Amino acid sequence: MLNIRNVKEQDLSDIVIIEQLCFPQEEAATKEAFEMRIEVIPDSFFVAEENGVIIGFVNGPVIKTPFITDDLFKDLKENPETGGHQSILGIAVTPHFQTRGVAASLLSHIEKAAKEKNRETITLTCKEELIGFYQNHGYRNLGISDSQHAGVTWYNMVKKL
């Protein structure tokens, strides 16, 4: 049975392993980035567990603008109590558990949490091959992002809440 909960400090090593399995090295968040996210934004960082084992996660800070900017990968502030835009800096699922609805469950969970705090939108960037996945979950493709992260072309995907 899938259980989704807020992140804890002791989840760090599992999260880093999943990130490294899912992203090329130049795109993957570092251990230090995850330490900061766990410390600063645990209220918008969720892990998915199957039988007590972490198999995926989703995280991101609440931001003032509707699009992600590259500085968010390095500089975080605590989330405001209400309002703003819920960003998703990362969503990843262990390869063995991909295509089983875990990412969709994580998206639903962060969306529900964002609605409870009156966030305006959920915003993320993705590569071209994932646009369809996010559109199937109600996100709109708002074109190519200004992000230069890892030298990749990213697309702004936004869902109004």
Image (tube, helix red, strand yellow):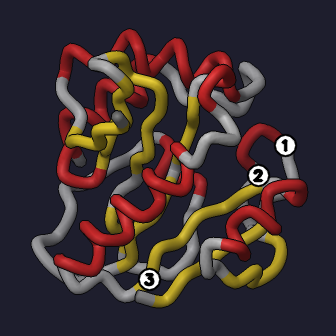
Kindly identify which numbered label has been placed on residue 121. 3
The x, y position of residue 53, in whole percent, is 35, 17
Please state which amino acid type lies under the numbered disc 1. Gly
Name the residue carrying label 1. 151
Query: Could you tell me which residue is drawn at 16 percent across and 70 percent down?
Result: 80
The x, y position of residue 3, in whole percent, is 29, 38
Instruction: Kindly state the secondary structure of the residue where label 3 is placed.
Output: strand
* Residue 89 vs residue 49, the one in the foreground: 49
State which quarter of the image contains the C terminus.
bottom left
Location of residue 145 (image quadrant): bottom right
Question: Is residue 49 toward the left or the right of residue 27 in the image?
Answer: left
The crowd level at tag 3 (other Cα within 10 Å; few <14, some 14-19, many 20+) is many
Please state which amino acid type lies under the numbered disc 2. Gln
Name the residue carrying label 2. 148
Question: Is residue 39 toward the left or the right of residue 111 in the image?
Answer: left
Q: Nearer the viewer, mark 2 or mark 3?
A: 3
Kindly identify which numbered label has been placed on residue 54. none
The x, y position of residue 77, in whole percent, is 25, 54
| Mark 2 vs mark 3, CA separation in Å | 22 Å
* Residue 91 vs residue 63, the one in the foreground: 91
Please state which amino acid type lies under the numbered disc 3. Thr
Marks 1 and 2 in Cβ contact (< 8 Å): yes
Location of residue 147 (image quadrant): bottom right
Q: Nearer the viewer, mark 1 or mark 3?
A: 3
